[in-house]
Image (cartoon, rainbow, N blue to C red):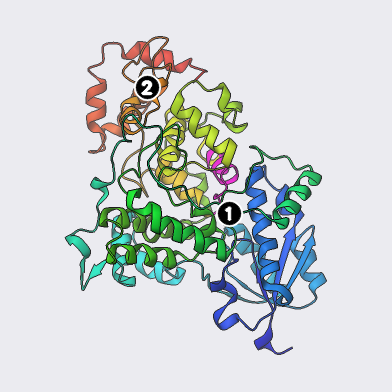
Amino acid sequence: MSADDTPLWLFADQLGPQVYGGEHAHRPVLLVEAASVLRRRRYHRQKLHLVLSALRHAAADLGERATFLRTDTYTEALRRYGRPVLVHEPTSFAAERFVQRLHRDGLVADILPTPTFALPRAEFRQWAGDRRRFRMEDFYREQRRRFSVLMDGSEPVGGRWNFDTENRESPPKNAAALDIDAPYRPREDDIDEAVRRDLDAMGLDTVGVDGPRLFAVTPAEARRALARFIDRRLPLFGRYEDAMMGGDWTMAHSLLSVPLNLGVLHPLDAVHAAEQAYRDGTAPLAAVEGFIRQILGWREYMWHLYWHFDPDYLGNNALAAQTPLPAWWTELDADSVTAECLRHALGGVRDRGWAHHIQRLMVLGSHALQRGYQPRALTEWFATAFVDGFAWVMPTNVIGMSQHADGGMLATKPYTSGGAYVNKMSDHCRSCSFDPKVRLGADACPFTAGYWAFVHRHQDLLANNRRTARAVSSMARLSDLDAVVEQERHRDTF
């Protein structure tokens, strides 16, 4: 076999045609299902189902071109395969070190650049230069210019780069759910049935519950999921992007994070489809810009900062948060939670391995920040309990954005709030036993009281930040502050 016919080994998050098509369309493909990887961490049951379903569907779709091996380890599979392979850069530091070792041992012939993101890693390094502080808005604008997305010549469409102020509406009143078509729902098949049967037989220690497959895992499914979102859901996405409703777990979100992170949907395909909807007049600019910012801005930004901040980034703990994750949290025991917003968010993780970005940041993340959960353990929890969580996804999202554990390298302030924010942006508070306006007593909202306890604990840091100094000034006017702090010190139910 000539070097030009060297087989291509695909990891389970590199399963799209942009990886094995194009210049590589002539190559044989190796796919490996390694049992040791499934045992390595305590994953959500539905996450394991999605990954195995994606791998096995890829093998089926590639037909005779693919060799599919089920072994205990990747090394065992490569030795059994008996030929050096090409592989694209994997998506974690650990996997990258492993692939480099395989390369030195002769099992990997060459390592190619990652094709599943818009911007190559080398070009981000050039953009980053010697910056010490990073702001997503700078990166996002450069991405828009580079890929000529939502641009009129050298200017942004609509005269503004960011329409976030239009994308913060509260949920509609007197409604249990948004008046919007349901998201795409894949049909399970014989492959899914076999995956479920095999997972049962493995007896793995998992979290969450089993359930129907809710997310696209093949390129064909991803195209259908994208089309349904663009055609039927994108117009309402922006308005209610930050809203939460107890009876509507999807709201107007795309549910495309799983196919994007499995590599079966390329980010530029999603971006260009959304832009075309605006150009065609079928979706408003604010909704389109908000969706594009999530993918071409935030998602790409998190990917590149994962590599730019070295592995030691996970050890950052600027707020000295040392509280272990409680059992009700790690076991996804939503039924033991009283606060409606927290119960719904944790229940979504238990039942689906998914919650939308405001539930992650302003409910789960805000709670963890207020209670001082250990950030590295929290990052691991998000990476394993969420079906779209991968090693590269969570460090900057959790350590940097959610927990401010990097001391401001990524975000300019800690992101937390009292119950007033939850009350404004959700319908949870109206049926909750806690009162978002109360900070002391049996019906004191754990987010409202927890907010003031957090501000008190970190008042020196917050007073020196122009974006949070007002919170410290407001705290000083609370006549019951000592009692609130003492109450929250001993709170063990939420």
Q: Is residue 129 visible?
A: no
Amino acid at circle 2 = Arg
Which quadrant would residue 318 be assigned to in this image?
Answer: top left
Magenta-colored segment: predominant secondary structure: helix
Residue in view at x 56 percent, y 56 percent = 216
Q: Secondary structure at mark 2?
A: helix
- 10 Å neighbourhood of mark 1: few (<14), some, or many (≥20)? some
Q: What's the amino acid at mark 1? A: Pro
Residue lying at the far left of the rendered structure: 159
Q: Which residue is mark 1?
A: 186
The question of residue 388 being in magenta is answered with yes
User: Magenta span covers which residues?
Assistant: 377-391
Does the rendering let one see residue 153? yes
In depth, the one of 348 and 473 nearer the eye is 348
- Residue 222 shown left or right of residue 463 in the figure: right
**Distance between the Cα atoms at labels 2 and 1?**
34 Å
Residue 214 versus residue 108: which sits nearer the camera? 214
Observer-side mark, 2 or 1, equals 1
Q: Nearer the viewer, residue 418 or 477?
A: 418
Q: Is residue 198 left or right of residue 438?
A: right
Identify the residue under disc 2.
430
Q: Taking 52 as reference, is 116 above or below it?
A: below
Residue at screen point 49% across, 60% down: 307
Q: Position of residue 417 (x, y in %)?
A: 34, 30
Drawn side of residue 462 relative to residue 123, left or right = left
Which sits earlier in the primary sequence, circle 2 or circle 1? 1
| Rendered location of residue 257, percent (x, y) | 49, 54
Q: Is residue 382 magenta?
A: yes
364 displayed left or right of 218: left
Category of crowding for the residue at label 2, using alpha-carbon neighbours closer than 10 angstroms: few (below 14), some (14–19), many (at least 20): few
Callout 2 touching callout 1 (CB < 8 Å)? no
**Residue 399 point in image, percent of width and height:** 46, 44
